[in-house]
Structure formats: C-alpha cells, structure tokens
Image (cartoon, coloured by chain):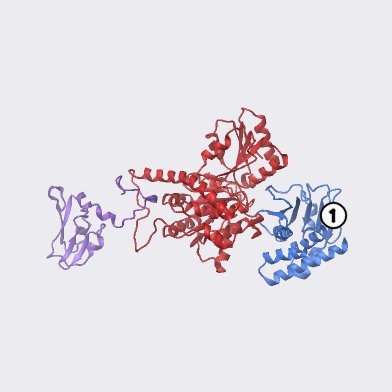
Amino acid sequence: MEKVIETSHAIAEAVRLAKPDVIPIYPVTPQTHIAERLADFVADGLLKAEMITVESEHSAISAAIGASAAGSRVFTATASQGLALMHEVLFIASGLRLPVVMAIANRALSAPINIWCDHSDSIAERDSGWIQLYCESAQEAYDSVLFAYRIAENRDVLLPTMVCVDGFSLSHVYERVLLDNDEKVRKYVGKYRPLFKLDARKPVTMGPIGYPNSFMEFKEQQEQAMKMAINVMRVEERNFKKHFKRDFYGLIETYNLANARYAIIAMGSVCGTIKHVLKQSRLKDIGLIKLRSFRPLPKEALKKAFEGLKAIAVIDRAVSFGNGGVLWNEIKALSCLPVHSFIAGLGGRDITPRHIMKAFDVMQKEKENEKRIWLK
Amino acid sequence: MPGKDMKLKPGAVIDEPGSSTKTKTGEWRTLKPVVDKKKCIKCGLCWLYCPDACIKIKKDGADIDYDHCKGCGICARHCPVKAIKMVREENGKSN
Amino acid sequence: MIEVKCVGRGGQGAVTFAQLLSVGAFYEGYYVQAMPMFGVERRGAPSMSFTRISKKPILIRSQIYEPDYVVVLDSGLLCVKGMLSGLKQKGVVLANARKEQSISVKGVKSCFIDATSIALKEFGKDIVNTAMLGAFAAYTKLVSLKNLYKAVDERFRNEDMRKKNKRMIKLTYEKCLEKI
C-alpha cells in the first residue's frame, strides 16, 4: 500500500516490522520523530519491544550492546552530538560483532551550534567498524532498515550497521512510500539467530582481553567481514528485488551513466537534486554515481563505474580539516582521473540546482587542473 | 588468553565455559600458603579474601587449590589465628 | 510541477499545512513532497514549509525558490523581506488578512481571506493552517475537500480535532468559492 508519510515514520514503520526485542534510545534533533513514533508503537501495543529510555546516547548504545549480546534484535537511532557521545562504545559494538542497527538523522556537529544537515557526524565514525548506508528518499530509508538487518545479522558479516538519512532535508520530508504488507516484510527480514549469546544455561565469555598475540587477528576478521559484507550486499540486492519486486541498490546506484564521460559522486538526499538537474538539462555527457554504502567502500563497483570517464566530481557534506572532502580523498585514491572536490551543504545549507550546474561546469572545463571548491 | 593455537571466534567470544581453570597459574608461585589445620577455626576469611577463588572451607579446615593459587599471601595476612604460613616452594614447583 | 511555499509564524502550522496538502494531493493521484524549513522552533518566529505537487515522480530535494503559490498565514509577513520573493509571473499569493492589502510583488494575483476570524470562532485559537488549506483548495481546485478530510483524519487522532479542522476547511472553502 502506498502512503504519504514522513521519512522518520517510514523508518519507524520498517523497525516495527523488523520487530526488535529491545530499543534503547535517547531523543536528539533531528532523530526525535523516529524515537517518538516507536514509542507510540510500543505504547499502542503494535510493537512488543522493551523500549529503554536511557539517560544519554552513551547509555543507549551500551544498552544496545548488552541486549544484542544477550541474543536480542536491537534498534536505536541518534544524530550529531549524540553519535559523537557514542563514539568510544561504537568500536565495542563492532569489535564484539554485534549486529545492532542504528538510524542516523545526519546533522552537523557544533560549534557553532547547528541542528541542520550535513554528514560530519557519521563520517567522523567512518573508522568505527560500522557498516554505513546513505539514503536518498523515504522509500530508500524504509527499504534500507530492512536490508540493514539482513546484512548485519548475516553470519558472514555480523557487523553493526548505520542507516543514514539527511536530517530535516530527508528525515522530515513527507512523500510517497510503498509499504508492503506486514507478512511479506517479516518474511524478508526473518528472525535473528545469534551465533553466540549470553545465556546462563550455556555460558560463554564475551569481551575478554585481546592480547597482542591475538588482537590483530580479531581486527583482521573485522576487515574480512567488511569485505564479505560487499558480497552479501550484492546477493541481498537481488533477493530484495525478487522479494519486493522493486529496484533496490545496496552498494551504488548509477544514473545517466551509460554514455557519460563525466560523473558526479555523492551520498544522500542531494542525489535526488542531481538526478533532477540531469533530467532537466538532458546532459548526456554527465552521469551520477550515488554511493549507498560508504563503509564498506565498494571499490570494485566504483572502479567499474569509472570506466570510460574523463573526470569525476565529488560532492562532500563533510570535511576532514586539513585534507579537504572525505569522500573526495577516498575516490582520489581509487582513480587516476582528475577528481574535483566540492564541499556543499554544510550545516543545512541548501544544495540547489545552481550548485550542481556549477560542479558540472567546472568538471567539463577544467581538464587536468583539479579544483577544490566550496559550493556556498 | 586465546592463544595462537585456539580458533579465534568472531568478536573474541570464548564459547567454552571455564577455560580459565585450564591455565595452571599455580606454576607462577614462589611462596606457597600452608594451612595448619589444627589452628584453623574455619572462619572463612581466607576464602573471602582469596583473589583467585582458590580456597574452600572443608570439614577439617581451609583447603587450598595449589593448581591455581599464585601465592599472593593475602590469606596468610588475613588469617586471624595465624593458621596460614607462607613457605618457600621446593624447586619452584607447585604441590 | 506545482510548487507551494507556506509562510507563517511558529505555532500557526505552516509545517502541518504542507503535510496535509501533500497527503490530500497524494489521494488525488499526484506525486508529492512536503518539506519543512526548520528553524529553532520558537512560537511567533517566522517559519516556512514547501510542498511540491506533480504528475511525475519528484526528484529535486532543494527548497523552493520560485513558487507558484505563496500561502501566507499571517498578513504581517506580507511586508517581511523575502517572503514573496521568486514568485512566478503567473503566481498567486493567498493570504490570511482581514482586508485586501497591496503586495510588494507586481503583476501577481493575490487573494485574501480572513482565516483568523474563522479559526478563533471555530477553534478558539489562531491556528489558521487548516482554514487556509480550504482557501487553497477553493482557489486552485487541486485538491478536493474529501481528500483533505482524509488527510486530516490521518494526521489527527483526536475526534474533536478532526471535526474542528474539517469544519474550518469547509467554511473557508465555501467562503472563498463565493468570492471567486
């Protein structure tokens, strides 16, 4: 059934169907609507989950780890300073290989105080060992939550996963979402069958010390799991399409790329605006590569998408101060082509078709001369 | 400690309970606690204080698990009737 | 594609206006997108929302700079800089005001309706978004009353709220039809 709902509510709807056992959560703008809607579901008896209203995000993710270790399916959500407060605990979730799924309503980090969208919060957690999926639309956010559970809980992966939506610019947008019937969705998500769990009847030790003689091996396993996640996502993309009869992209989506000589790479809701500009301008020479999975970075898929290109433009909504756009750096490492860097949409600055056209212009005019431009 | 010979489970989970009993830490000992069962009043203070849970109070008094006792001497320090003495290990061997 | 900008003051319901309009238009068969321009919400501060209504899927996600309609929930905002800027040549300003006012943008059509009186009478509060929704429906014929009611039912859980809001939509709708 198609309905017009808010992206936050679409996420909550997907969570309701994934039936997590435990939801430890702390509200923070612009994630609050997700938490509120889940609280409604629990209060109305539509979702039988233990909702723990914790005293901070540090506690939210800690409780999520405890619950996941006990074998529960877990969901939580946060943004910005809340995600930053979780920082040290995020590594524990991934190190313990607990498939927690967390929605992020992307928001800038202070200072100056800012509640609006950019990607600095989740990009800052790039190296925390979490899978990161970025969404363009409400539909994609809904689908991605379901997808995230399938990936995270896969025995070959077992990694916590962030589903990132742009704060306000997507989280608070109302639009059409195709909501499948409950049974169909539940059949897709399935039940969580933990590899290990804390159970007094069959004791195990979780979180022991990792001495120098084994720590590296465990980290190597995490890196392997990330690599496996790429394969699993490829398979799950197909499963998703087969099950729901609609397109779904787990790693990357390309648009207008078939005959293009130039490509623009971006993540999140801005990809919609780029598609719009491409459609309106009928530029056959430029295509879009929408990166859905930032971690793991689908290097092979990206390299394949780069074939036949003359130049690339990367739009970053986060900066690594002292070394420019974060995604730009990563794309630069993958390609010998000129890669132009555009910083845009920081702290909720609207990214307009004019900005996109500017990036197109620069990419086509500046042949070898790599540009780094702030689209203001 | 999961040694190199052990299979490393995802997330460093140790799925075999009680694995710490397999490491005979008794070998680390220099001084060994010896209980004078005649003096022991079975008060249980040594049992309470032992950081390695190596002491059980049996019918005839405190009984020490020499396989795992590291010889820290806390039991001897706390024994109110001085029933436990720390004695040098013969050949550095336990038991 | 029709682009609607709704400007109001915090608490008047500009954001809910966009939500209800988008849901109503969806039931008419359109693709829709409603987007708030969120500030640090303070009662009385200017606030804004954007609605896109289209026969084709909507891809663009930036704010609306060249609206076809500007719905003004508080006539005091008519003279605030930027509120009407970018309005298309054939654009329409739909404002909540006691009497006709001159507006700064030349050549565009403007319609005035005293929604505050209706809201105060029917609702006891100066929340005029649903009343202005009725006005919008009457002037544009984009959304039927039936589908706006559907949107109201979806949005509010409280039966009293549903009833009052639907009544406000109906009253303004009828009042505007008389004017046209």
The single residue placed furthest to the bottom in the displayed view is C160
Q: Nearer the viewer, residue A219 or A241?
A: A241
Residue C36, given in percent of the width and then of the height, sits at 68, 54
Q: Residue at x 58, y 55 (%)?
A: A244
Q: Residue at x 13, y 47 (%)?
A: B91
Q: Nearer the viewer, residue C12 or C139?
A: C139
Residue A260, given in percent of the width and then of the height, sits at 64, 35
Q: Which chain is red?
A: A
Residue B25 horizontal side relative to residue A338, left or right: left
Residue B82 horizontal side relative to residue C105, left or right: left
Please state which amino acid type lies under the numbered disc 1. Ser
Residue A350, given in percent of the width and then of the height, sits at 67, 46
Which residue, given by chain and number where applicable, does mark 1 sit on? C110
Q: Residue at x 80, y 52 (%)?
A: C79
Question: For numbered disc 1, what is the local secondary structure?
Answer: strand
Please identify the quarter of the rendering in which residue C137 is found. Answer: bottom right
The answer to whether residue A287 is above or below residue A57 is above
Q: Nearer the viewer, residue A51 or C48?
A: A51
Q: Which chain is blue?
A: C
Q: Colour of chain B?
A: purple
Please identify the quarter of the rendering in which residue B60 is found. Answer: bottom left
Residue A121, given in percent of the width and then of the height, sits at 55, 47
Is residue C124 visible to us here? no
Name the image quarter holding the C terminus of chain C. bottom right
- Pointer 1 chain: C
